[in-house]
Amino acid sequence: MPEGDTVWRAAAGLRTALASRVLTRCDVRVPAHATVDLSGTTVDEVLSRGKHLLIRAGDVSIHSHLAMEGVWHVHPLGTRWRRPPHQARIVLETSDQQAVGFSLGVLEVLRREHDEQAVAHLGPDLLGPDWDLEEAVRRLVSAPSRPTFLALLDQRNLAGFGNEYVHELLFLSGLDPWRAVGDVPALSAVVARGQRMLEANKDRVERSFTGSTRRGEQRWVHQRDGSPCRRCGTCLRSGRLGDSPTTERNVVWCPRCQR
């Protein structure tokens, strides 16, 4: 699943290709907005907010969320697509660039004056210019008995963490995923560490948490259940954790390093 740094990079690429440029083609391939045509409109700005993207042009905003499999590809006009055409949900072109959104989980065209409502539910953006550590911690501890793993994943508390970051952050902080967030000592320091991890990885295509960029060596615990802990050698355990059976996620941790 894309995490906050992936979306931040997507916004940066879209900004370079589209910002202050006139759209020469706009093809929205979702039924609710199929008649929208922004050709001749200048793209004013491209913003990321957690895992959400806003492309503002004229009096509208194109709001997208990558969900599980979505991606934005940006390339010179005329370049062959790297995904099948039937996966394309939107095509935006300038005189020399093309941006295509494939398999987007959310794609909608909003009135610009109301686009903030689409992201109003989000907590402070970990990679945003208005990142607010104190507000994020306040939201986290508003439900003190909630497992820390779930509290950190909740985009209403803070926006940008996904499974991979939360797994790695809890390992590096020595925290059991089931531990109540209200019982975490120095929670501010834990969240600040996670924010630094995002900052360090935001310009990398292959993120790393261990200090190694070699394939297969970048993670401590994420997707390594059943493997030996890189730190102590204990077999990593896995389980399921969620607010309800339908929202459960796989959790991996070291029973020795995370207590």
Image: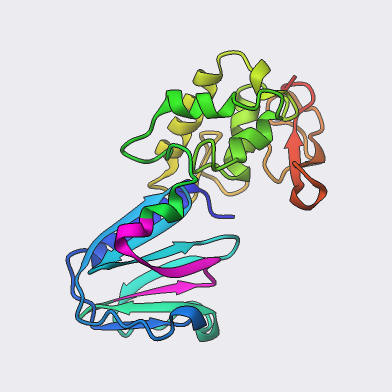
Instruction: Judge left or right: residue 254 versus residue 188.
Output: right
For the N terminus, the image quarter is bottom right
Picture coordinates of residue 166, whole percent (x, y):
61, 37
Picture coordinates of residue 245, whole percent (x, y):
82, 48
Residues rendered magenta in the picture: 98-115
Instruction: Judge left or right: residue 85 versus residue 37.
Output: right
Residue 52: image quadrant is bottom left
Q: Residue at x 44, y 23 (%)?
A: 134
Whether residue 217 is visible to the viewer of this picture, yes or no, is no
Q: Residue at x 51, y 83 (%)?
A: 31
In the rendered view, would you say 172 is above or below 52? above
Q: Residue at x 55, y 14 (%)?
A: 186
Q: Toward the viewer: 251 or 137?
A: 137
Which secondary structure class fits the magenta region best?
strand
The image shows a total of numbered marks equal to 0
Q: Residue at x 27, y 60 (%)?
A: 15
147 is within the stretch colored magenta: no
Q: Toward the viewer: 19 or 83?
A: 19
Picture coordinates of residue 131, whole percent (x, y):
37, 34
Whether residue 57 is visible to the viewer of this picture, yes or no, is yes
Residue 259: image quadrant is top right
